[in-house]
Image (cartoon, rainbow, N blue to C red):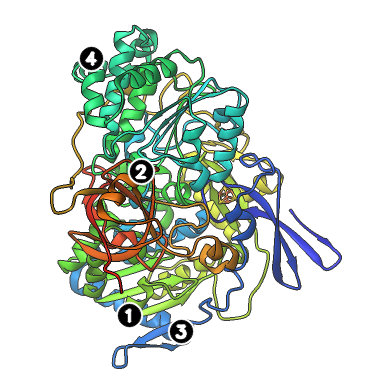
Amino acid sequence: KKYQVGKVKKVLTTCPHCATGCQYYLVVKDNEIVDVEPANGPSNKGLLCVKGRFGSFHFVHSPERLKYPLIKNHETGEFERATWDEALDLIAAKFTEIKKKYGSDALAGFACSRSPNEDCYMLQKMVRCAFGTNNVDNCARVCHSATVAGLAMTLGSGAMTNPISDITNDVDVIMLVGSNPEEAHPVIGMQIRQAVERGTRLIVVDPRDIGLSRQADIHLKLKPGTNVAFANGMMNVIIHEGLADEEFIRTRTEGFEELKKIVEEYTPERVAEICHIDADHLREAALMYAKAKKAPIIYCLGVTEHSTGTEGVMSMSNMAMLVGKLGRSGCGVNPLRGQNNVQGACDMGALPGDLPGYQKVTNPEVIAKFEKAWGVELNKKPGVHATDVFPAAIRKEIRGLFIFGEDPVVTDADQHHIRKALESLDFLVLSDLFMTETAQYADVILPGTSYAEKEGTFSNTERRVQRVRKAVTLEGEMRLDTDIFIDLMNRMGYPQAQLTSEEIMDEIASLTPSFAGISHRRLDKGESIQWPCPDKKHPGTPILHVGKFSRGLGWFYPAEYVPSAELPDEEYPFIMMTGRILYHYNTRAMTGKTPGLMEKEGHSFIEMNTEDAVRLGIENGEKVKVTSRRGTLITTARVGDKVSPKETWMPFHFPDGNANILTNAALDKYARIPEYKVCAVKVEKLPAE
Ligand code: SF4
């Protein structure tokens, strides 16, 4: 896993960008990472994308790295260098004071979905044992929390059902819904493209033209926010054509009759009108999907990031159960999780209602088990979701916040609202690699370590737990994040022994049935394990729900189509969607430090349809002003036919016009995910200077 040739050391590890979980070697010379070489990992088979290949090491050695703790001088507003003792003593004193004055639930902590499982586990342990609250969450709240909730409710397990290789090899049809893998999960995108070249048929359901829609047999370019209507229309056709799998429905599911009643109203003609698609294309897609022997649904944030995101996810389960395409090879419902370890952050219990392994804080047996193991009385009240922490801060219900490796000013919907919430806090602590936009609001900033400086594991989108290995030791006072949490726990009165990453994974395994058989030792021997892995001899579980759903019977969720929270009107006549581009990952905290990637794409833009641009007198490449009810920005117009008339699309990576100045923080009722994919904006040509 680590070997040396002359002065060059090669360290096998896992890519820190998206949740594909590609394996590669970091090539290290004189304690500096100089290159990346692909490895033949189970999910990447020797492939890498531009982010993994070129964007994975410049940031590690960036001169902009935070190297020592900083405390804000409130008189000057400047950050001043501090010792670790000064910084940690101050945090412990302030958080303890808030806890004494306002109660444990006035504190909260966010875990970092970029960081290893072991870090996320210790962060949530710190929040639960030392802070005394379940107010802990991670950035899945703003990307796939609807998946975690929706798949758990319908199938019993909130995770991808089948492995990547299983759904891209030898399948008859792939149905890709609200997912642009060639930009967001490029190595999965490559595998889908290869499958299509080998003869797999492709249905793309997406409001935009994406690279893969050009390869598709059918592209349903539906109106943003209409996924539930689309799925109900598909099921209407499947039932009327007699293609429902009656045996599967009878033996493996419940709730079908109620669903059938609802989808009866979603005739192809009605759905065509709601979704702005062709009724015959919908029929064709339904027949193609239902008749195929092997046909996975692969979906992403185009399904989840809506005020009805959880219902969108449950609609994916409904479609797959209707045709019996679950619990077997080449099928399933497959969310492509976003960040490298966002699956793991959820698995590790960085969720307000769940302890590690999705064990509920409301279950007395679970609580008793953790109280015994951790030697502390735990708070039994489910915590506040991350997206609700901000309004709670403005109401002064939450006063102290520890943010580990997140930058919500950039990533969360309605940026002004987030800034106001951060200003309202009594005490904000940030642990990060760089001085982020959110860090400007902190009282104390702690310098953490990157994936290349620590040991641990990431869980990729297919539930595969893979090793992260230390490659370099950098100069500076940065500390392992787990050591920071342990130190703080002790200073706040919870006695926590020092633990290595390997020992932390052993503790996780001892308390988490789905991880019971997982250890660094097994992974270092070359085993590749997908949870659930209930014991040390178990090989892991590539396909979920074989023979029986995790919840027993699969549940058909009867969902009616409900329009998005904010629709275009006379004043704001365009729908705006947001998304990612190939060259950057989320806040660009890592990819933004790679000069080549910044050269490829370094600035914000808005895509708009030619018809609208002509009407407004806007030319391709011109600067435009974009305004929503929440803010205004200046960006560059990209004119073409990728989006439909009256629709626009923006990436959110760039500070010069961050789309989240405009987005709407309307929340899904189950998962509290914001509606990033639909808000109303106006676009104006800027007057000539
Ligand atoms: Fe990294 Fe994702 Fe690219 Fe693989 S596909 S190299 S995991 S960014």
Give the CA separation, mark 2 to mark 3: 54 Å
SS for callout 4: helix
Name the residue at the bottom extreme.
75
How far is disc 4 from disc 1 in space, using C-alphas?
Answer: 58 Å
Identify which residue is drawn at 42% across, 79% down: 88
In the displayed structure, 331 sits above or below 634; it is above
Which of the two labelled residues, at mark 1 and mark 2, occupies the earlier sequence position? 1
- Three-letter residue code for mark 2: Val
Query: Can you name the residue that lies furthest to the left here?
Result: 570
Residue type at mark 4 is Glu
Q: Are marks 4 and 1 in contact (CB under 8 Å)?
A: no
Q: Is residue 176 above or below residue 40?
A: above
Q: Bin the neighbour count of mark 1 within 10 Å (Cα to Cα): few under 14, some 14-19, many 20 and up.
A: few
Q: Residues within 10 Å of mark 2 (few under 14, many from 20)?
A: many
In this view, the residue in front, 399 or 338, is 338
Relative horizontal placement of residue 235, taking residue 119 as reference (left or right): left
The reply to whether the C-beta atoms of the residues labelled 2 and 3 are less than 8 Å apart is: no
Identify the image quadrant of the C terminus.
bottom left
| Label ID, residue 85 | 3
Q: Which residue is mark 1?
A: 93
Q: Earlier in the sequence, mark 2 or mark 3?
A: 3
Foreground label between 4 and 1: 4
Q: How many marks?
A: 4
Residue linked to disc 2: 643
Percent x, y of residue 161: 47, 31
Name the residue that disc number 4 marks: 257
The percent position of residue 14, horizontal first and vertical second, equals: 61, 52
Q: CA distance from mark 4 to mark 3?
A: 63 Å
Residue 436 in the image: x percent, y percent? Answer: 41, 72
